[in-house]
Amino acid sequence: MQRETVIQVPDNLWPVADFFMKDLGGEVNVADDGEMAILIRGFVLLYLTVALFAILAYKFGFAKKLSPIKSLIIYILLFIGVFILTLIFGLNLPLAESLFIIAVVMGIYRLRLSQERKQNKSNEKAEQ
């Protein structure tokens, strides 16, 4: 019995996943080391992109001052969760694109919040 050694690559990938998987073509021969290296490289780059956007979204929107051990645990769990999400949904859903938009919106929110706080402090000093 001969095992199936060809994996079909979808042709309707989302832009970020398509960018990282563009060198694959329509099929990946699992027996070919060069094609497997391209597949693994594309997945790792997609994972790192998603992890970066997830870290930015967390830092801009949800991060609080925690002890280093608690922060380390949070980031380890974030990296594990992002790996699982990228493995399952990375090619089929706009995961990186969504996290990019979330990070931008949270960054704008954080910037506006800090500007408003500075303005309130300066108004309080002017009143005194």
Image (cartoon, rainbow, N blue to C red):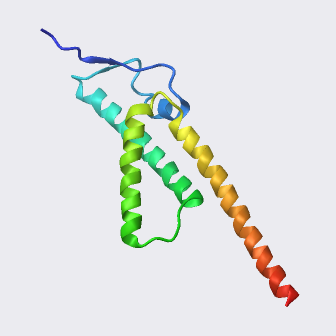
Give the percent coordinates (x, y) of residue 39.
34, 31
Q: Quadrant of residue 23?
A: top left
Give the percent coordinates (x, y) of residue 81.
39, 46
Give the percent coordinates (x, y) of residue 115.
74, 69
Give the percent coordinates (x, y) of residue 6.
28, 16
The quadrant the N terminus occupies is top left
Q: Residue at x 38, y 51 (%)?
A: 79
Picture layout, residue 9 above or below residue 88 = above
Left or right: 78 with respect to 7? right
Left or right: 90 with respect to 31? right
Q: Quadrant of residue 42?
A: top left
Which of the two residues, 24 or 14, is positioned nearer the viewer here? 14
Left or right: 127 with respect to 88? right
Which of the two residues, 23 or 30, is positioned nearer the viewer here? 30
Q: Quadrant of residue 94?
A: top right
The quadrant the C terminus occupies is bottom right
